[in-house]
Image (cartoon, coloured by chain):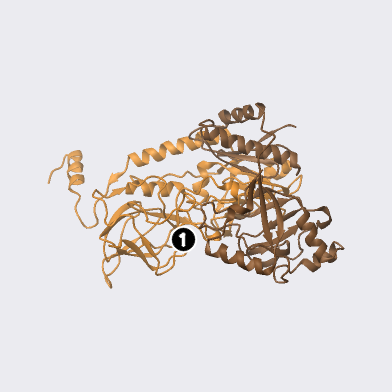
Amino acid sequence: MSVRYLSCGDTAFSVEFGNEISPEINGRVMALHAAIGQATKGGELAGVVETVPSMRALMVCYDPMATSRAKLEPEIEGLIARGLPTDMKSRQVTIPCCYDDPEFAPDLKEVAERTKKKPEEVIASHLASRFKVYVLGFMPGLAYIAGLEKSLYLPRRSQPRVRVPRSTVAIAMDMTTIYPFESPGGWHLIGRTPLWMFDQRREQPVFLAPGDSLTFQRIDRKSYDRIARDVEAGTFDWARLVKSA
Amino acid sequence: MIAQLKVARAGLFDTLQDLGRIGFMALGMPTAGAQDRIALRLANALCGNPADTAGLEIGVMGPDLLVEAESVRVALVGPLSPMLIEKPDAPPKPLESDRTHLLKRGQVLRVGMVEGSSTAYLAVAGGFALPAFMGSLSTYARAGIGGYEGRKLAAGDALPLAREQAPPGDEKKLAQPFDYGSGPVRVVWGPQDDYFSDKGRRTFIESDYRVSKEADRMGIRFEGPTIEHSKGADIISDGIGPGAIQVPGAGLPIVLLGDRQTVGGYSKIATVASVDLPRLGRLLPGQTVRFTPVTVEEAEELRRDQEARLARAIAGFQTARPPGGIDLVRLYEENLIDGVVY
């Protein structure tokens, strides 16, 4: 697999592992992201400011006062040549989701009709999907989470909604997402989690991270309300949703 | 004692900004930060602040600020014509920009309009006493984070000051306005220049592009000849660096600035060299630019030259005469140089 180094001006470049969405390519992106993080913590790779993983590429941001492209690119090449870790540890995250309230899931019926399923079968497929967080972006804490069961693939809505409530769970194409803020959105809304994907009161304001493995857990409206109260009050125990694999 | 600057009258788009929220792009967090880092750094240096202290980014028109502190030293940098109102109903007195001013309790600083640029900066000696979020005070208004309640300033806001009174010392000024350079905006090809035809790439560097009305802290949409793609406008989303120039299907370039999203799915023909990003952060709707390619190495070298010039500008600050007073030191020095003694 050939690696391409693409210029992003004089303060960043992109290390591109391929031009398709595949778990293997993304695995290498995440491995290099982790390897550079390790190296900079250990005092190597002076001048690297941060790295930004996406589906198939890692953007390496650097300070041209502290290093240069000519110096840094071979250092990154060396890191890749030394061999990237293949057994990346990932967090196993469970997201409670309420699918039952029609206000939370305005598109459930339409998704069911278009995928020729019953609404209960749509929910079952979403629950059975083994998701992975590929990339965060577009807005703080918004995760593109791939791994949706094939039978649920649908294009985005032709008419995006102006307002999607915070914490809505939605699907489109081969992905699911959770809106961190109220915002416009063109995905199909099938549920809502009581969790906030972004909460600036938390020490780690963004809950999900690239590389996380993720499944949804069905909750009823009563549980939703109880968790929502705790999240709002800032007393929710987030650690119980996360297992290190 | 509370020490604060009270917004007596709001400007148009004034937000607190430092050099950006660095290190969280992987979590989808935009960097934000000063559109014109040079002017902010000059303002901080004039005040004796560390370079990454947050200052007020003045967008188009600044606020009236009432001093509710023993005293405060402010530096204004940029094409401003500020005024000082010494007490209620007193006629406003013009002040100079590109220097510090010592303000006293009850005085009102009228920051006024920014002329010929979209941004100017105000720094206060000691900085603002506001909590950093993810290591930075930069305002990212779209998510309501950082700065003052995560938003632009409004009338009645009170900006807490870290110091109850100004530190002792002379007022300082720039020897001359910083030279941002003119001529074409330098860009580095890529990361997706191979998504464009030869004709498209030529159009991009041989045409004038005009800043449209859609220009803000997120980016600038340009108007001009459309740029031809060869492999289509869409890519599998990847990271967006500062100054990235994305070209959606309609063929018109958008330069992405501090509040840009961290990843995006449009092909990026080129990236503005970091040396010229402060110029982009100053552009006004209706102004035109030309883009010209340089190599990565040239862009890095240009940036290092600019940093050296910035360091020289800071080392060359002059002592400013207090308004209405006589700067005795300066008077004697100039007399000695001129050889004339009164």
Front-lying residue, B273 or A40? A40
> Residue A72, how many percent across, how many down?
57, 31
Chain A tint in image: brown
Viewport quadrant of the N terminus of chain B: bottom left
| Residue in view at x 28 percent, y 69 percent | B91
Q: Is residue B220 left or right of residue B35?
A: right
Quadrant hosting residue B8 = bottom left
Quadrant hosting residue B143 = bottom right
| Residue in view at x 37 percent, y 56 percent | B129
Chain B tint in image: orange
| Rendered position, A84 above or below B285 | above
Front-lying residue, A63 or A124? A124
Most distant residue in the left direction: B342
Q: Is residue A154 left or right of residue B187?
A: right
**Residue type at mark 1?**
Val
> Residue B33, how many percent across, how many down?
49, 51
> Residue B34, how many percent across, how many down?
47, 51
Q: Is residue A164 left or right of residue A64?
A: right
| Rendered position, A102 above or below B185 | below
Front-lying residue, A58 or B229? A58
The residue to which callout 1 is attached is B60
